[in-house]
Amino acid sequence: MIHFSRWKIFLIVAVSVWGVLFAAPNFVSEQTRHSIEKNMPSWFPHETINLGLDLQGGSHLLLEVDVDVVIKEQIESFFEEAKKDLRKARIRVKRKGVKETGFFVELQDESKEAEARKLLRKIDDRAVVSSKDGLVEAIFEEAALKKIRDQTVEQSIEIVRRRVDETGTSEPVIQRQGDQRIVLQLPGLDDPERVKSLLGKTAKLSFHLVDFNGGLDTINLPNKESDGGTIPVKRRNILTGDMLTNAQPSFQDGAPVVSFRLNGIGAKKFCEVTRKNSGNPFAIVLDGEVVSAPRINGPICGGAAIITGSFTVQETADMSLLLRAGALPAPLTIMEERTVGPSLGSDSVRAGAIAGSLALGFILIYMIASYGLFGVFAAFALTLNMALIFAVLSWLQATLTLPGIGGIILTIGMAVDANVLVFERIREEIRSGRPLVSAIDSGYKQAMSTIVDANMTTLIAALFLYSFGSGPVRGFAVTLTIGILTSLFSAIMLTRLIVATWLKRSKPKTLTI
């Protein structure tokens, strides 16, 4: 017990120094941190723990993805493609219609059933295609619908993340909740209304030729540039937003515009369309509204173009952001909104700090009063243990929440529990007449299995909380897990090294503990 190999001593000291250095930025002023960051090498610790929504204020939004819209769009797209392919294959239909989860076609010639089934399966292999007496049905069963829902929600989460990141919001929490809901937490958000506005736009961009002559393939869309006015456009688009590679706010003739660039396919298609329709207007449609309808003055073949209109600078910035992030696959509805003010957050931080300080203070007093010099050793190890928890949280750039503070406070009690087990065991060994060094050695050995068992059972509980919990529960589980690991280090290695060093240097004959 007394002997520690050099590599063990180096490891314990290195981890302890690392803990103090990485924890220190959390306890100095912002000005001092900036000074350290500016004057010290880039590898020198300067990161701090990120405070969660409940500690620094911000917005909590619960969003619902309208997945039914996507299912309907995919069924209709499948139906249109099927009608077109059936015509090409010269398979005549006398009746057709769309259902909630698919569509049907009634053939004029029942002998064409097998050919029609094969054709429909080729278009979309997710659908279950069946036929009887000339009636062919293509239905999306529950497994296929669930896959569509999951893909839609996951894609929506990714687009939401891109849009939020573009606004400069730091450490947002974006998580799926249930089948079609998304939890969005934005700590420290200054302008929640702008983010809500950005999330409320699907941002589906398309380009259509304007058709003043009208016809079966023409639809009237609202025109942003005229109150209550509409513009007739071709139903079929010539370009879609997924062909954009970049979009940036810019100026032309002193007016705010959006400049964009197309990918290779889009640039080629745009060049052909503008060459064939020179002199005619075309409409730029965003979420079903015409935002601009410029005239094609000549072929646009470079892959770059601009969107003009009566925009403000903020509108061009937001439109560029939406186009860069991509279109949402389905509309989002804000189901719940909560805002935590900065003052309430700072009160929570203050209350947590007071609770933690009182817990630490009373435990240190108790340990020193109960175990004397060994209590001082335990107090030092416990203080360093707290530094290690803050260091790991800072290093991982974890987000600390109010339940997380609860986990840290619980850890304080658990950390000292290991020392109590060891010291009580040493007391028993001394009372039984063992020599001092032997009693200390036996105390650590006998208590070790109990310490490991107690901490491992708590660690298992923390892992289950993290696996099956969400939000605040996970925050509690993270700090508790980190606290357990650092407590084991401080109790098993750090306190032991301190006691061993004291024994070697002081060589006491007796011990009162």
Image (spheres, rainbow, N blue to C red):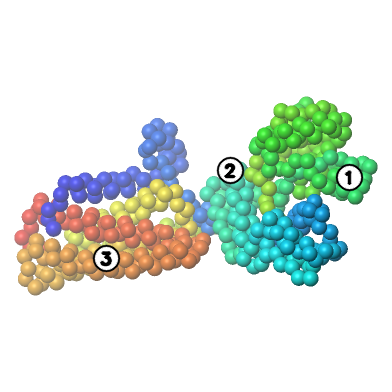
| Measured Cα–Cα span from mark 3 to mark 2 | 44 Å
Tag 2 residue: 168
Give the quadrant of residue 404.
bottom left
Q: Label 3: few (<14), some or many (≥20) within 10 Å?
A: few
Drawn side of residue 131 relative to residue 509, left or right: right
Give the quadrant of residue 318.
top right
416 vs 104, nearest the viewer: 104
Tag 3 residue: 452
Q: Is residue 17 above or below residue 109?
A: above
Which residue is at 71% across, 50% downward? 201
Q: Amino acid at mark 3?
A: Val
7 vs 76, nearest the viewer: 76
| Measured Cα–Cα span from mark 1 to mark 3 | 75 Å
Q: Is residue 52 above or below residue 467?
A: above
Q: Nearer the viewer, mark 2 or mark 1?
A: 1
Give the quadrant of residue 442.
bottom left
Drawn side of residue 41 relative to residue 296, left or right: left
User: Could you tell me residue 308's position as x and y percent?
Assistant: 78, 34
Label 3: which secondary element: helix
Drawn side of residue 274 relative to residue 369, left or right: right
* N-term mark: 2 or 1: 2
| Measured Cα–Cα span from mark 2 to mark 1 | 38 Å
* N-term mark: 3 or 2: 2
Quadrant of the frame with the C terminus: bottom left
240 vs 8, nearest the viewer: 240
Q: Amino acid at mark 1?
A: Pro
